[in-house]
Image (cartoon, rainbow, N blue to C red):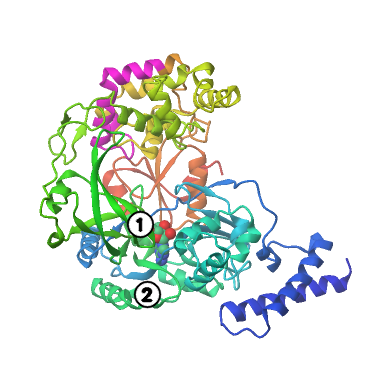
Amino acid sequence: MSRAEEKRAAELREDIERHSELYYSHGKPEISDREFDALMRELIDLEREHPELATPDSPTQRVGGAPVEGFEQVAHDPPMLSLDNTYSLEEVEDWVGRLDRLAAGEPQGVPRAYVTELKLDGVSISLLYEGGVLRQGVTRGNGTVGDDVTANVRTIRNLPLRLEGDPPARLMLRGEIYMPRPVFDALNRLREKAGAPLYVNPRNTTAGTVRLLDSREVARRRLEVAVYQSATEIAPSHSESLEMLAGYGLPVRSEWQCCADVAEVEAYIERWREPRHEMPFDTDGVVIKVDQLDLQERFGRTSKAPRWAVAYKFAAEQARTVVKAISVQVGRTGVLTPVAELEPVFVGGTTVSRATLHNYEDLARKDIREGDTVLVEKGGDIIPKVVSVLTELRPGDSVPYEIPTQCPVCGEPVVRYEGEVAWRCVNAACPAIVRESVSHYVGRNAMDIEGLGDKLIDQLLAKELITDYTSLYSLKKDDLAGLDGWGEKSALSLLAQIEKSKGRTLAHLLHAVGIRFVGERVGRTLAEHFGDLDALVAASNEELEAVPEVGPKVAESVVRFFSDPHNQERFETLREDGVNLTQPRAESTDTDNPVAGKTVVLTGTLTGMTRGAAKKRLEALGARVSGSVSRKTDLVVAGEKAGSKLKKAEDLGVEITDEAGLLELLGG
Ligand code: IVH
């Protein structure tokens, strides 16, 4: 490569970036699209000839590369949480009230402030910059693990491949990818011309686009991104972080605002209620965040969402339709859910033909009947709901809906437990319950038996080849090979999947068998704490409650589950079939290090490393790093200017160490 070529590549890169910026950030292009494409073409050719010239931040990365086979899975650290929703100003006030109560008794520092932002209706993305260069883009996935869609993210033109200014060496960001309305409309016009089915709404189209395997196609779709959060601590408040991010050249939407109190929050919501329709992107609400990071940390999070932020959802679009029938769904736990079968109607961007009626109490309160004309609403949620009945349109012969006294699937009488709203079928052999529980058992986050879809489960149950999830392990090749459309090869491949599932961890198994209140996360906590099934089964309520994040409800449910003879029998069968009933030690195998299995809280400022790095290293040693101090905390590491957490630790008599002590624990 000659000096001249190297120089030309640098020149081209600079020109292209400048013209992109003129186009995207200022809306004032100086050259035509054609001229722009010519510059890009020249750079692509140069880089192809001299691959050493290609850098991850070269604008050519935006054109997209050859299709990939699939996406790598990447773990999120910290996890990508979702938000709790509110639907009225009262609910927003309730949220503030909850924060007030949580803060009561804490030392009063600077008054709490809020940041309000528009809630973009797209697809969330985690972005990683290292040394100022975009390294990775990962979808939310299940919040813990997502898909590495870096090649696709690089094609998003308003996202800088290299940051300006002086960003931290490692910067983890969270944002929303969306398809601007005009882009979506143009895409659909093209499809209409081509006679292709139209896309339903920008959000679904964005979700589909982000996960395309061919990034060249993604590049054509003109997605945009808005960054709304720094997952790396870069400033003491969210508002200052947003300003810094904008300073790095990142696309932070400018509509955000600082609010001193709930009245200002409400004014912001009101101010955007109407004008949001004029924006070139879909918004479904406002996100309200506590501004100060130390307060955020104090409020902490639940397993799903932060307590320090909440979404206010604008009233969803409504439409009128007719209830053709009311049917009943029997879920995995036996709960009967009434469902309205609707005359199909287009609402909130999709065609809706069924809506959940939640439960019979709700149904009776709204007095929904077959034949009624109703208002249905589709919010940001996938599941539409029936809002109200237009009683003036009710047919003369209509009769109130009656709650079934028998399970519509197995015919056994239904029951209602004290204090519960739900009616349940409690027949463990009810085909609906068995079907749903098998379907749950084989799920990807449970025992992960690929190829065992609901249709096949139905066939296996109908032919009595299985009776519950334990009987999957007795399936024989000939059982399967005899099914419609099945041959030896597909049978063997499914059997191999079933065999493989025996090696899943105890955590997966606990989630798979569907113990009430034990989902993925609690399942893992229990499995990691007890190490194997026998220890878990032997645990008393008190021992269970001593486990971090396990409360009396979970403890009670676990004890009840394992004292049920049916469940005992099932686990015996699983054991005999060779299903793994143990949990590998969390990451670390080094059990004699002093922090393994301990709950540690980091507070204050560390000088030698970031808190995130300390957390990672502690976790690698088998510790659990928590955000708040409680009686279950084993150790508090107090950095400089440690505040309320240190005080609480002292009050509770929890062991405390400083940064030097931490370094010692980490082995220097
Ligand atoms: S903050 C821990 N801010 O809404 C912080 N989210 O319903 C959690 N979203 O998954 C998110 N605009 O994809 C935040 N300004 C905004 C947002 C926003 C859109 C999305 C995001 C999140 C979802 C939760």
Secondary structure mainly formed by the magenta segment: helix
Which residue in the protein does label 1 denote?
83
Q: Is mark 1 within 8 Å of ligand 1?
A: yes
Asked whether the viewer can see residue 130, the reply is no
> Disc 2 beta carbon < 8 A from ligand 1?
no
Pick whichever of labels 1 and 2 is earlier in the sequence: 1
| Residue at the image position 47 percent from the left and 45 percent from the top | 661
Q: Indicate the amino acid at tag 2.
A: His
Viewer-side label of 1, 2:
2
Per the rendered image, the range of residues in magenta is 544-573
72 with respect to 572 (left or right): right
Q: Residue at x 12, y 62 (%)?
A: 392
Residue farthest to the top? 576
Callout 1: few (<14), some (14-19), or many (20+) C-alpha neighbours within 10 Å?
some
Q: Kindly report the distance in space between the C-alpha atoms of the residues bearing marks 1 and 2.
A: 22 Å
Ligand 1 is in which quadrant of the figure? bottom left
Q: Which mark is residue 357?
A: none
Q: Answer with the quarter of the image where residue 161 lies.
A: bottom right
The label shown at residue 277 is 2
Residue shown at 45%/47% (left/top)? Answer: 142
Single out the residue that lies furthest toward the right. Answer: 2
The verdict on residue 141 being magenta is no
The spot of residue 271 in percent (x, y) is: 30, 78
Residue 406 showing in the rendered view: yes
| Residue 40: quarter of image | bottom right
The kind of residue tagged 1 is Leu
